[in-house]
Amino acid sequence: MDLCNLSVIKNLMSDAGITFRKEFGQNFLINRMIPEDIADNCTDNSDSLIIEIGPGIGCLTQELAMRYKRVVAIEIDKGLIPILDKTLAEFDNVTVINADVMEVDLSEIVRTYGEGMPVSVCANLPYYITTPILMRLLESGVPFSSITVMVQNEVASRLIAAPGKSDYGSITTMLGYYGTVKRLFKVSAGCFIPAPKVDSAVVRIDLYKEKRFNPKSEKLFRDLVRAAFEMRRKTLVNAISTKLPQYDKVAVTEALIALGLSETVRGERLSTEEFVNLSDILFEAK
Ligand code: SAM
């Protein structure tokens, strides 16, 4: 059964008595090559446990199951579960969990299904919740080798933006803290049913095996990034002293000068490393 075939999708859904749910960001792939390409590129290690978020009717899940040792697919929509039971019946290496990825215990899933195995994430993400899902994965403490996800193309541009570019934001800085990102390929809106308004892209995040940055206070580093981008039109000195008043303008100015940065610099110009260094100087100064 070709799960990217339009009439197959429609028949499966009408037999189950369900329709596409916009509130869950349901845009299903209808171009066979895309799930194949995503599955091919998600990790180099076929012995991996792959966690898929939002399997839909299972088109990407099948491709993952054919290539990797174990797949755990987390789907929020309970109406899709009977369909997945059917479409994934032939694969004994797949487990479907009916849950919200924002609430499941990812470490527990890894302990249960992939203890000691390399773990990666692979997903065509629901667009209404892309950034919170990415942050949840990165902050989960699970040592993912890679996270390969389809996102809106404009979000992909944000994830890979260089400091100083208009697309650069707090998610870019935070991703840089955990690993490196690249855009693998673009996917046009016509490859989905229903077709979204914008094109998409697949990005792969390769997580650092060893922590690359070790700020003296991770909390302060995070607070600085948040302050900088919540008030991105202000200078960094003003943004930090407004949002984190325990660091006055003089202290922040001195820290920037010590880093060789202009005292009028905006946060969007700083790399992840510069934010970490700034947080260390301010932490020491307290
Ligand atoms: N993987 C399928 C495909 O590529 O055709 C479907 C992708 S569709 C863009 C997103 C999927 O994520 C839907 O199946 C949707 O029900 C599911 N989803 C949405 N929010 C979710 C959440 N918070 N937790 C788990 N799954 C979610």
Image (tube, helix red, strand yellow):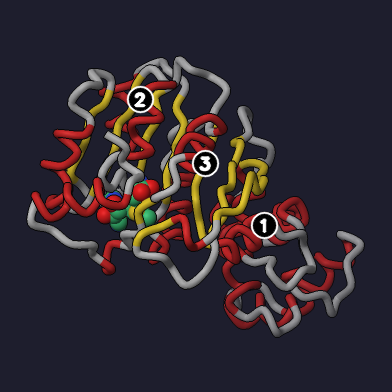
Vertical order, 116 against 167 (above or below) = above
Q: Give the position of the N terminus as an image quadrant.
A: top left
Instruction: Classify the position of the C terminus by image quarter.
Output: bottom right
Tell me where residue 154 appears, x and y as whole percent.
Answer: 60, 66
Report the residue marked by disc 1.
283
Kindly identify the amino acid type of the residue bearing the numbered disc 1.
Phe
Whether residue 272 is situated above or below residue 59 in the rendered picture: below
- Separation of residues labelled 3 and 2 (CA atoms): 16 Å
Marks 3 & 2, CB-CB < 8 Å contact: no
Give SS at disc 3: strand
State the SS at label 1: helix
Q: Amino acid at mark 2?
A: Ala
**Closer to the camera, 93 or 265?**
93
Few, some or many residues within 10 Å of mark 3 (<14, 14–19, 20+): many
Q: Which mark is residue 148?
A: 3
Q: Is residue 102 visible?
A: no
Query: Going 71% across and 61% down the picture, which residue do you hit?
Result: 282
Residue 56 screen position, x and y as percent: 28, 48
